[in-house]
Image: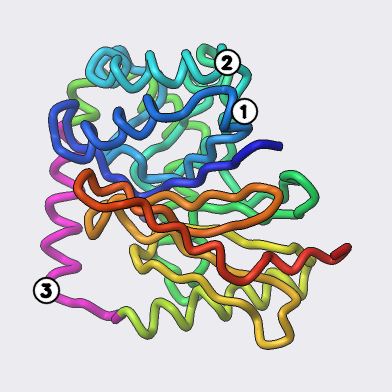
Amino acid sequence: MTGAYFVSDIHIVSPDCPRARGFCEFLRSLTGKDASHLVLLGDIFDLWVADHGYFIDRFSEIIDEIRRLLGEGVEILYFEGNHDLHLRYFWADRLGATVYGEATYVEIGDRTVRLEHGDQMDPDDRGYLFLRWFLRTGPVSFLVRNLPGRLIARIGERASESSRHYTSNTKTIDDTEAVRKIRVHAGKAYAERPFDLIISGHVHVRDDWCSPDESFRSVNLGSWLDRPCCFRLDAESAGFRELDRNEEPVTRDTQKVSAAGS
Ligand SMILES: [Mn+2]
């Protein structure tokens, strides 16, 4: 492997928004020579549903870069978030990325990595977990693929406006609590099936933590709403990279991922 790059929760709202520009710039900086994997861990777009021409045309610049990377042999893994759904019709079937709807274990280099968006991390969030299931049932999938893309976009905008309104008024979970949930979830997942590294997104709180017995490392990617960054993993090191234009890249190749075999 050369390098595996992980990003999530960019929440791109339009092709010209600063986060879309930053993401294009980031994609342009990658080539098949230095990147073996690009892992998109959900909520890359503030809204992307199925294979509507509306989204494909709107974000064609990003799609072109993705196509180039695939052509250069970069493996692209896209995990659905709660803002980007039913991705396989376009991202897998037409582009050639691998799309996942659930947590998955992947071997990258000599590490076993558990990957997931993170929206199933909180078992207390029953209302959301029901909605998540509902949005993926057959009839709803059929409907969202067959309604006009522009209408889907309008419904999505309404929904995210009201959810922003809702979360800003009733912030039920603070950063400390979010970090606790990330780590508890990592421990539970490890007990079910071990890994060297777990990477998630969704909660928008950047976290990089080694379990007390150093058996695994848990990373949450934070959000580009706070600061654009990616996590990079290669054979020697693993750490966050800042992607702000004015900042020097900071690589925290800190604690080595404690691989079972090393
Ligand atoms: Mn999310």
Residue 98's spot in the image, x, y percent?
61, 29
Q: Is mark 1 on a helix, strand or loop?
A: strand
Residue 90's spot in the image, x, y percent?
47, 18
The image quadrant that residue 203 belongs to is bottom left
Label of residue 75 in the image: 1
Q: What stretch is highlighted in magenta?
A: 154-174
Q: Locate residue 113 relative to residue 66 in the image: left or right.
A: right
Residue 257's spot in the image, x, y percent?
68, 65
Report the residue marked by disc 3.
169
Alpha-carbon distance for marks 1 and 2? Answer: 9 Å
Q: Is mark 3 on a helix, strand or loop?
A: helix
Vertical arrangement, residue 85 with respect to residue 163, above or below: above
Q: What element carries label 2?
A: loop
Amino acid on which the number 1 mark rests in the picture = Glu
- Please identify the residue farthest to the right as the structure is shown: 261
Amino acid on which the number 3 mark rests in the picture = Asn
Amino acid on which the number 2 mark rests in the picture = Glu
